[in-house]
Image: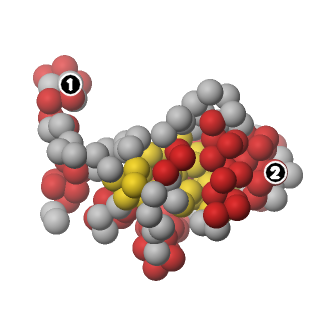
Amino acid sequence: MNFDELLLKRYSCRNYIDKEVSLDDIIKIVNAGRLSPSARNCQPCEYYVIRGKEKVEQIRTELQRPGFNKFVPNVSSFIVIALNEAMYKTKLDGLMRDFTDIDTGIAVHAMALEATNIGLATCIMGGFDYDGIARLVGIKDSGRVRLVLAVGYSNDGKIQDKNERRKRMEEVVKYY
């Protein structure tokens, strides 16, 4: 699949088949995040892979706690994206301009594209119980938790053409 096809195919899936994702595929996805560019090459992200049945059930509960993410019961794998402790402390100390959330977004987008490339579906989530997710993966300060990526197999039929759901180029691009 070429890059344009990949961009058109990737979407936020909210309808999954209860089928386990292989560890090899998860490693490919996490590696896409690891290889992503970051400001000053600071590489601020850490990745916590949730795959075992018990942990998957626990994270599903935390993801749904505030009333969000009702689609997660059939998702078989999750990746928690957090700032590493050194970057989080640097950010809080204000010693540099903060690019960590931008870097996190770049990394998770690369991961979502790689998942699509290998035939998997994803949904990037930012609304959940941050304290609960931090406890689940052993992070003391829940402020380090940034996003959770749901990874699994789509149960959707034909996906609507993304061009039909996006604003027209004339609405979003200004030429000077």
State the SS at label 2.
Answer: helix
Label 2, residues with CA under 10 Å away: few <14, some 14-19, many ≥20: few
Is residue 97 among the parts visible in the rendering? no
Q: What label does residue 95 carry, if any? A: none
Tell me the quarter of the picture where residue 6 sits.
bottom left
Task: Kindly identify the residue that appears in the image at 41 percent across and 41 percent down.
Answer: 14
Mark before the other along the chain sequence, 2 or 1: 2
Query: Furthest residue to the right?
Result: 140
- Kindly check if marks 2 and 1 are in contact, taking CB atoms under 8 A apart as contact: no
Q: Which residue is mark 2?
A: 135
Where the C terminus falls, by quadrant? Answer: top left
Query: Furthest residue to the front?
Result: 18
Q: Which residue is mark 1?
A: 167
Task: Kindly identify the residue that appears in the image at 16 percent across and 54 percent down.
Answer: 4
Front disc: 2 or 1: 2
| Relative image position of residue 94 (x, y in whole percent) | 76, 41
173 to the left or right of 102? left
